[in-house]
Image: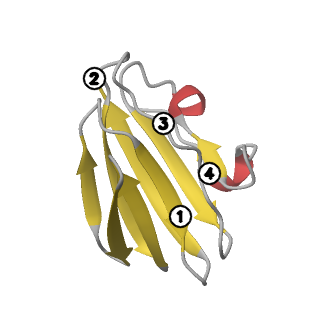
Amino acid sequence: MPGDKVNYHDVDQVGDAMHFLREPLGCDQLGVTVVECAPGWTGKEHDHGEQGEEEVYLLLDGNATVTVDGEAVPLEAGDALHLPPEATRQIRNGDTESTFVLAGAP
């Protein structure tokens, strides 16, 4: 097989929502995370300024708001949001289950 394969359901969930796939996939630069958010779930506010890692948040299902540098950005299924490394970000899920794919790299 030309690359590593993993099913995110087989990766331990962290923080009641996140499946970190970088290590199980053997990625050197690219981080990939699947986030399964329960209604009302709120993620940790953070940035990646020190790491220089930009991210893209892709909302596959549901609705959620990502607060970026204090500004609420509402997302619907199918929306993607680019986040520069220094921007603070926090996911706030809506009233239904949601699924994100987060991808980040320097």
7 displayed left or right of 26: right
Q: Say the numbered circle drawn on residue 8.
A: 4
Tag 4–tag 1 contact (CB < 8 Å): no
Report, in whole angstroms, how far the alpha carbon at label 1 lies from the one at label 2: 25 Å
Describe the element under mark 4 as helix, strand or loop: helix
Disc 2 residue type (three-letter): Pro
Residue density around tag 4, few if under 14, some if 14–19, many if 20 or more, within 10 Å: some
Tell whether label 2 touches label 4 (CB within 8 Å): no
Residue 46 - label? 3
Residue type pointed to by label 3: His
The secondary structure type at the circle numbered 1 is strand
In the figure, is residue 79 to the left or right of 35?
left
Residue 92 marker: 1
Please name the amino acid that badge 4 sits on.
Answer: Tyr
Residue 15: numbered disc: none
**Residue 57 in picture, x, y percent from top left:** 36, 54
Report which quarter residue 67 is drawn in. Answer: bottom left
Mark 2 sits on what residue? Answer: 106
* SS category of the residue bearing label 2: loop
Q: Please report whichever mark, 4 or 1, sits nearer to the chain's N-terminal start.
A: 4
Given this view, does label 3 or label 2 mark the residue nearer the observer?
3
Q: Earlier in the sequence, mark 1 or mark 3?
A: 3
| Relative horizontal placement of residue 21, taking residue 73 as reference (left or right) | right
